[in-house]
Amino acid sequence: MNKKELNPNVSVDCVIFGFDLEQLYVLLIDSGGMEGYNQSRMAVPGDLIYDTETLDTAARRVLKELTGIENIYLEQIGAFGDPDRIGKKVSDRKWLESIRAMPEARVITVAYYSLVRMPNFNPKASSFAKSAGWAPVNEVHDLAFDHYEILQSGLEQLKRKIKIQPIGFNLLPEKFTLSQLHKLYECIYDKPLDKRNFRRKILNLNILTNLDEKQIGVPHKPSQLFKFNEGNFKKLSEEGFDNFGF
Amino acid sequence: MNKKELNPNVSVDCVIFGFDLEQLYVLLIDSGGMEGYNQSRMAVPGDLIYDTETLDTAARRVLKELTGIENIYLEQIGAFGDPDRIGKKVSDRKWLESIRAMPEARVITVAYYSLVRMPNFNPKASSFAKSAGWAPVNEVHDLAFDHYEILQSGLEQLKRKIKIQPIGFNLLPEKFTLSQLHKLYECIYDKPLDKRNFRRKILNLNILTNLDEKQIGVPHKPSQLFKFNEGNFKKLSEEGFDNFGF
DNA sequence: ATTTGGTAGTGTTCTAATGACACATTGCTC
DNA sequence: GAGCAATGTGTCATTAGAACACTACCAAAT
């Protein structure tokens, strides 16, 4: 096995979700048009792996190299391996020629996803990323390669997962209100949820601690702030719950 | 992209589950010890992919080549990519040297699983498989490479999936009794389930048709036979159900 | 013909979870 | 102090879940 050499056949891609208390975002980079042109070519951060690293490590490395974001928990979405997945569009092929040592190689990719607190993670583009930033998930339509499909798979997995584990809380600031959590679930499920039933159900989980602290400076009745109760939260994360659906 | 050439870096592995109305089985092959020795080396069927095929196609091809089994639905478990995953054990390394063109290459694998009616699928070993057959899942301990870990992931995914989709019915014969279905769920969940509650819940799904036909030749009260009601079954497969847990 | 062994098949009750639904409260702004 | 905008709260009716024990039926043995 060669050390520190890019494996031409395997890449990783990272679908990073964020939330600004209004809508869901996904972290995209502009991988740049082909040499000499100035087109933009939006993609989720991803690149070939080294032969010496695990897939998880590779995903973490690539994410950091392209966007500066690090120290997050990544979960695998799965492998995408259509032989044509990177060669269907002319723009993709030109891009590969301009950047890869073996642009014709068949590449399968392993996709990961994660949920982060947007304000804590300010992407800074580097390596071949011309820019990096958050795009509202609903407004993303075309992406490089099969990244749109990968994004959709990530979304589906997120929806499935949120029903059986208290993830998604990573998307909120440390102190948050029940309304914000409520909004988050509405965004992910993409449908309205009854406020009272939501509050009842979430409070019954016993993973929230009321901070006896209120919002300040809001032009309406200030809301109670909550944080996660680490103990119960971790326990529940491991066990999962049967059905947190609505 | 080279035609019909094995990609030295990517393989597929297939975890095929079966059920004989008593317990869960998994399809294993004996990939043979190293040259000149006669050790057995149990593994789930798997091999390198061709550059021209999709991962799904590769899984189907490899499964057929090694065990003769074909025409089944495969679902992806995920990718396994520890750089050492195939080189940790001496026996694995020797085996690779005896069979692979590039035994030192780093190989990531994409695992698939499926559920089949055991009696309909009689594995016949070919290619490098010295033998192929069903092994009770509970009695499997050591496997080649990281196949034991892959098997466990497959089992976990099966347990998760069975709660939200009427899979698992593929494990039963066309005509089956409620007791057999009951037993199947107990095997997969690995715990006893209340008979009456189980029957009520499964019948409420409206996916079974009573055949007005009874078991014959059993040394006890014969049971009603059922089959799946294709229409409702397919509808429910697509929609999934929220929580078929116990 | 009768007994025995073994599995099939069936209902009720209690409890917990769900979903539908409307109005008073608070703090800020003007 | 009037108006605005979001917070925060309770009940009831329905449904789903868990616990639980006995009779019915067939075959095989006696």
Image (cartoon, coloured by chain):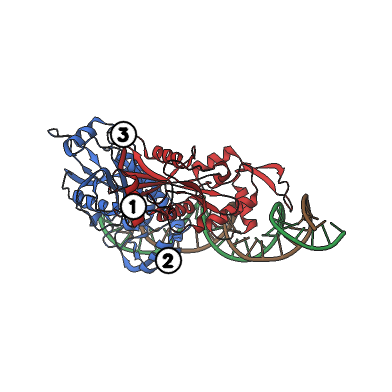
Chain colours: A red, B blue, C brown, D green
x, y percent for residue A5: 31, 36
Which numbered marker is on residue A94? Answer: 1
> First in sequence: mark 3 or mark 2?
3
- Judge whether residue B22 can be spotted in this image: no
- Using the image as rendered, state which of residue A185 and residue A203 is in the foreground: A185
- Within 10 Å of the Cα at label 2, are there few (<14), some (14-19), or many (20+) other Cα atoms? some
Counting from the top left corner in percent of width and height, residue C2 is at 33, 59
Dividing the picture into quadrants, the one containing residue B151 is top left
Does the rendering let one see residue B12?
Answer: yes
Question: B24 and B105: which one is in front?
Answer: B105
Which residue is pictured at 54% across the width and 59% down the height? A190
Instruction: Give the tally of numbered discs.
Output: 3
Query: Which residue position is annotated with label 2?
Result: B206
**Residue that lies at the very extreme toward the front in this rendered image:** A36
* Label 3 – label 2 distance at C-alpha: 48 Å
Secondary structure under the numbered disc 1 in the rendered image: helix
Q: Amino acid at mark 3?
A: Asp
Q: Tag 3's secondary structure?
A: loop
Residue bearing mark 3 = B84
Mark pair 2, 1: CA separation: 53 Å
Q: Is residue A43 above or below residue B200?
A: above
The residue mark sitting in front, 1 or 3, is 1
Numbered disc 2: what chain? B
Residue A73 in picture, x, y percent from top left: 48, 40
Q: Quadrant of residue B9?
A: top left
Q: Are marks 1 and 3 on the same chain?
A: no
